[in-house]
Image: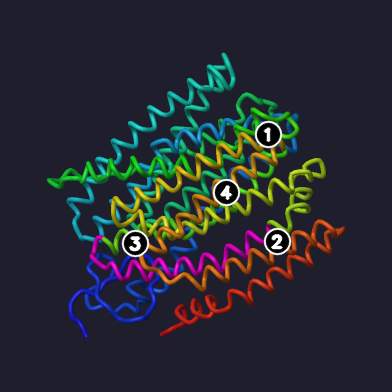
Amino acid sequence: MPSGPITTAPAGVLPGARRTGYAGTHARRGQIVLVVGGTPVRRVLVAGGFSLTSVVAQGLTRLFYSILIARFLAPGSLSDTNTVISIAMFAALLWPSSVANASTMFVARARGAADPALEHATTRFLKRRALQSNAALGLLAGAYSLLFFAPGEALTAGFTFAIVVGFGLSSFVRGLLYATDRVPRAAFLDVAALLMALSGLAVVIRMRADDLLLLPLASGYALIIVIGWPRSDRTNGQAPRREIDRFVFWGIAGMVATGGFLQLTMIIAHASGTPTSSDLYAAALTLATPAAMLTSVVSLVLFPSLARLVGSGDQSGAQRQTDLAMRGLAAVLVAAFGALTLLAPPLLSVIYGNQFSGASAILATLLIASLLGALSGPAADALGSRTAGGIRGLAILRVAGFGIGLVACLTLGSLLGALGVALGYLVGMVVAGLGSIIYAWRRLDLRWGALSARFLAGMVLLAVLLGVRDLATGTAAILGLTAVFLAGWALISLPDTRQLVRLGIRP
């Protein structure tokens, strides 16, 4: 048994429980920590719980923002507000969000290498890049709003600038908190921002101050930035500036081609449809976006963990961790997204009212597309945390999916309206999402053949039940079909579930 300081490893789950020493700063001298492949089981569960809280808070902010506006304001207000948010989020993906991802990777990797000087130098460099990128994109987004989206409306342009800067810098702060193992603080800030945004929106609606609808959301972002802004000591360390900038460059391409694509579809639907069809698309998009964000629960913990493992030289551990994360994500997300897809008609009616029931086909299409993107998360994290070649290949695949999907959105949107835009997004995610999984599968020599067969079986089951649902009447019948799907998928995914449970309870 080793002597001396025994400390905890970075967050992440690996097969094979053991007692181990790890160069870190979290355990007391002489303490022996039970770990699963380098990770204490309790830390995994706690980090996952706080990560879930953080992601749910972010999703609920936009979800309830849309619900309150749809319920209490005039038609068109929902699509107008969501379009501004989509413009802001798309602009942020052009640079700031990639800088945020770089902070998660490079700071975590420096911690894995146990190099405080490198960590502080990297943090300082990334803070400067974050401020530069958000200021530039905020000004461009504000100008676009002033000239094209809402010509001459300076207040709308100002809020667009604020949302871009707020979204980008809050993402940067969140990334650094995860990289430095301060997941609870990130969750606390996201919950506080949720409460501030929704309470502020309630006041704005009650005052009938429609011009200030985006002020509460901007205030929530400001809260995260002010409280969570990182402080770094000046050291003699040298940040890997060229490597970071290359990572950011290829990350921009990947970001635009995934998250940016989803937000861009709202802009396309708004431009090509009527106010009514735009509202239907906005309602469906609002429900699909939080569901798609569920994958962040894994990625927020997995990505910095993989970066730490790579920084410490444990390549085989990173590969095993990727495999386990993929199996767990597939088992959970296919069940969740499949159930939501079947429940789309009653879900829309309950949340938005019967006037939005026509968005069920749009919502189902967006959910299936988002599922493909979500399942590519572990593959993307594994590729992005290793080499420039991995992130470059991933970006090329995503750009291809974005280009093909954009053409499909414009073509099908002109023929089928809002549903055509959703179908175009699905086409793009088939190329980008499945392509990323296959690329990681081959490049990293992962054993996903049987897992892929089980996924296809689940999709066939879902397609059959969707056909039956269209012939059924009543909420009770839809609930019954959903139960059948969940039971069927539980049987199909049983081998992966058994493996996950066995690894989770191994002493």
Quadrant in which the N terminus appears: bottom left
The residue labelled by disc 4 is 59
Residue pictured at 45% horizontal, 36% vertical: 92
Question: Residue 251: percent from the left, percent from the top?
Answer: 37, 44
Query: Mark 2 to mark 1: distance in Å?
Result: 31 Å
Q: Secondary structure at mark 4?
A: helix
Quadrant in which the C terminus appears: bottom left
In the displayed structure image, the side of residue 142 where residue 243 appears, left or right: left
Mark 3 vs 1: CB contact within 8 A:
no
Query: Furthest-top residue in view?
Result: 152
Write down the region rendered in magenta: 311-340
313 inside magenta stretch: yes
N-term mark: 4 or 3? 4
The residue labelled by disc 3 is 306
N-term mark: 4 or 1? 4
Q: Residues within 10 Å of mark 3 (few under 14, many from 20)?
A: many
Query: Mark 2 to mark 3: distance in Å?
Result: 35 Å
Mark carried by residue 463:
2
N-term mark: 3 or 1? 1
Mark nearest the camera among 3 and 1 is: 3
Question: Residue 91: percent from the left, percent from the top?
Answer: 47, 33
Query: Mark 4 to mark 3: distance in Å?
Result: 25 Å
The residue labelled by disc 1 is 78
Residue pictured at 49% horizontal, 50% vertical: 432
Query: Furthest-right residue in view?
Result: 473
